[in-house]
Amino acid sequence: MSKEVKWTAEQQQAIRARESKVLVAAAAGSGKTAVLVERIIQRLLDPVDPLDLDRLLVVTFTEAAAAEMRTRIGAALTKALNRNPGHHHLRRQLALLHKAQISTLHSFCLSVVRRYFFELGLDPAAQVMSEREILLLEQEVLEQVLEDRYTGGSEAFFQLAEMYGSQREGLLAEEVLRLVHFLRAMPFPERWLEEALIPYTGDEPASLADMPWYGELVGAITLQVEGALAAYRQALSLAARPGGPAAYLETLREECAGCEDLLAALNRGEPWHVLQEKYRQASQFGKLKAVRKSDQVDEELKERVTELRKKAKGALQELEKYFRRGPEEHRRELQAVAPLVRELVSLVRDFLAAYQEAKARRGQLDFSDLEHYCLKLLCRLDEEGRVHPTVVARELARQYREIMVDEYQDTNDLQDLILQVLTGAAGEEDAPPSLFMVGDVKQSIYRFRMANPGLFLAKYLAYSREEGSSSRKILLSANFRSRREV
């Protein structure tokens, strides 16, 4: 007779949590799949509010993972039924297993598009392309678009092509496809392009702070400065210990203060020229005072302090490439590249239009179409950019009581909005489905498919560990794969 699983306190929290939004941050080897399966079983057997399996939407990120999840759920249901042969609700769940929505998000979107194809004006016989077919069609269409540009393109196009080197369209083609693949992972690609072009459309280029990527740049710099500051503070702590190199303290305090000033300016959102001055001050490193033999310094502590300071200095020195240009230099550079950016966007738009036409002629859809058509069915965007759920979204929301997402760290922006719309589409009498997300940002493996681990991190920082909060996070930290001595 097999032993019953002994769940840790953390695992039990994840299994039993009933908040409207739950994020489980699961370390490698923490048994997250087993926890997810047990949560499903417990939802089906809840003594107060038992669910039917078809009221759950379980999302995985590969077909193999979906098949494994279905098998595990089936095995768990069979085991429970063997213990309770007369349990009619359990028997019903086994019968529902074959049609339960346990699938990739692509498969879910396909089912939604097929169900509402008449709303989209699509051919119900349209076939979904394989990854190889998508790749071949992309290459075919891009070659034609580029050929048209080379035979009748503008001066800006030839400048753009020249900028990408002498391999004719090789590097330029890669850049076009890179931007196309990025846009496919965006909920509203054309809106993203329009907003990205705004700084490049006026007679005078926008300031650096107006660029769409400025926030990400400042965010990346802030993280680097926080890392440097953490190293400085650790070095100060070690230097102040008995046996530590106390002679280093004065220089370390001065450098740490400069780093703190820079971080404070970043957090206040100071203008770029202020950040440049703060960086200049923070990167003026002093000279460590010599340690005398009479100081009786622990050599190991001294070495650790030196290494930590070296780490902090290195982190700050890496930022010099961002701060060395003044506002006027940035403005001149933006002015110089503006026509090339506009040409690249025009090229991408031409490709997207030609690619859509080619698919329509063939009666085919790609994976991205499924997600974008699904989103189109689920919501509309108003002039202010606010998202509003549709009647279809409310119909689907009524169908599900909970949406469970495995490997949430591999979700992209488009997929996340689909999930958020579904869990935010409450009817007049019905509560929206709850959302249960499991993932480990350290294991994100689909960056090449434009997965955005930042979505996971944002929720991890925003959600509370308090039981009963509307948005709750639970940490699974125990690693059951490693031996204790590892």
Image (cartoon, grey):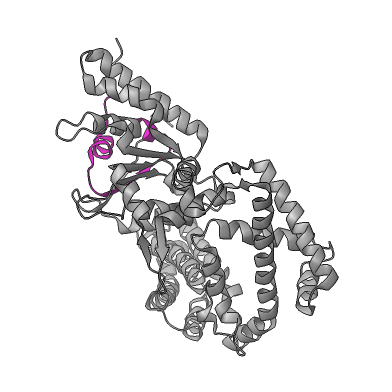
Q: Is residue 220 above or below residue 429?
A: below
Q: Is residue 425 above or below residue 335?
A: above
Q: Which quadrant would residue 331 be assigned to in this image? A: bottom right
Query: Residue 214 in the image: x percent, y percent?
Result: 51, 74
Please name the residue shown 42% across and 75% down the image.
266
Please name the residue shown 34% across and 47% down the image.
396
Please name the residue shown 50% across and 61% down the image.
306
Residue 243 in view in this figure:
no
Query: Residue 291 in the image: x percent, y percent?
Result: 47, 66
In-front residue for pair 402/325: 402
Please name the residue shown 76% across and 62% down the image.
145
Query: Residue 233 in the image: x percent, y percent?
Result: 39, 64
Q: Which quadrant would residue 184 be assigned to in this image? A: bottom right
Image quadrant holding the N terminus, namely top left
Q: Is residue 273 above or below residue 253?
A: below
Q: How many marks?
A: 0
Q: Is residue 26 above or below residue 425?
A: above
Magenta segment boundaries in residue numbering:
5-34
Q: Is residue 254 magenta?
A: no
Q: Is residue 440 left or right of residue 125?
A: left
In-front residue for pair 115/2: 115
In-front residue for pair 327/54: 54
Residue 468 in view in this figure:
yes
Query: Residue 444 in the image: x percent, y percent?
Result: 50, 46
Q: Is residue 23 magenta?
A: yes
Q: Which quadrant would residue 85 be assigned to in this image? A: top left
- Residue pushed farthest top? 1
Q: Is residue 452 left or right of residue 142?
A: left
Image quadrant holding the C terminus, namely top left
